[in-house]
Structure formats: structure tokens, C-alpha cells
Image (cartoon, rainbow, N blue to C red):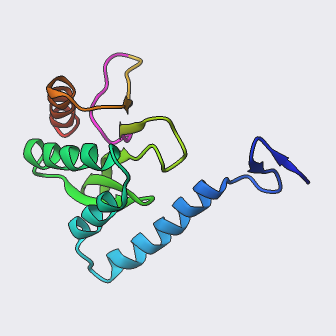
Amino acid sequence: MGKIEGKKSAGFLTDEEKAAMRETIKERAMEQKGANNENAVLAKIAEMPEPDRTMAKRIHAIVKANAPGLSPKTWYGMPAYAKDDRVICFFQSGRKFKSRYATFGFSDKAKLDEGRMWPTTFALKELTAAEEARIAALVKKATE
């Protein structure tokens, strides 16, 4: 079988998806050893290229300040924040899956419900005071 649009057609997962799964296996092993999850998050942020690194640092500070009940952890190799070991929100570098922008997203555990449809993931190209305020408000609402 050949390649389709730069992806191997012999399997269902891209190389990036396989790498994310390997990250998950490492994360679970580290959690069992009682590793410091915040240090792991900060290490992942440090590996990111700019401008994602700066945005991830700001989001880390925003989440810690506005949702102190959330615990930093890595999730599929991404910085994430969890309550009772369930991920509530996460930051994904644009490089993670070769995207043109980074994303900040929420899991189904976040309490963001608004009727029958609401956004759960936001594209980020830059963080200004307006975006930071919106992220702070969403994080607060997600953990109410």
C-alpha cells in the first residue's frame, strides 16, 4: 500500500497519533511512580517552539490562578489540568499534529454546557488580555 496525503495507509494511526499514545504509556508509568506532574507539565512546555511555549506558560499561570483545585498533569504528551484525575482542560501545541495554530480545549468533564451546543476547543494564534480573560472565565466555569 502506498501513502495517501503524507500518511501511511497501512494503519489507522498517523505517526503523530502513535507518538501521543506512546506518551500516554509513559505518563501512566510516571503516575504509578508518584512523579511530580507539575514538573512534567513544565518540561513539556519547555520543549514547545515559540510562540506556543509562551502561550502555554501563560495558560499554565491562568489555570493555576483561576482554578486552584485543578492539578497539572500531562495527557497524551500535552499540558493538562485535572480534577480527581479526570482532565478538565488542556493545551495542545500547533506542532503536536502539524496544525497551523495551537489549541486550548476542554474535556466532556468540564461544566461548560450551554443549551444543546457549545464550543469546547479554541484555536490560539496569540494571547492578548482579552483572550486571557476569556480563558480565565471559561476555566472558572468549567470547574464550578
Locate residue 115, reporting x and y percent.
34, 16
Q: Residue at x 26, y 52 (%)?
A: 81
Location of residue 124 (image quadrant): top left
Residue range highlighted in magenta: 106-115
Is residue 5 on the magenta stretch? no
Left or right position of 10 against 133: right
Where residue 98 sits, quadrant-wise, is: top right
Left or right of 72 in this view: 25: right
* Residue placed most toward the observer, 113 or 30: 30
Q: Where, quadrant-wise, is the C terminus in this rendering?
A: top left
| Residue 123 sits above or below residue 60 on the image | above
Seen at 32% across and 83% down, the residue is: 33
Q: Quadrant for the N terminus, please.
A: bottom right
Q: Residue furthest front?
A: 50
Q: Position of residue 94 (x, y in %)?
A: 45, 43
Q: Hey, which quadrant is residue 31 in on the image?
A: bottom left
Residue at the top extreme of this rendering = 115
Q: Is residue 18 above or below residue 60?
A: below
Q: Residue at x 36, y 31 (%)?
A: 125
Count up the numbered dots.
0
* Residue 110 inside the magenta-drawn segment: yes
Coordinates of residue 73 in the picture (x, y in percent): 29, 61
- 113 to the left or right of 57: right
Q: Main secondary structure of the magenta part?
A: loop
Check the image and report above or below for 94 versus 32.
Answer: above
Would residue 36 be visible to someone looking at this image?
Answer: yes
Q: Could you tell me residue 104's position as x and y percent?
A: 34, 38
At 21% from the left and 65% from the top, the residue drawn is: 38
- Left or right relative to 8: residue 74: left
| 19 or 68, nearer to the observer | 19
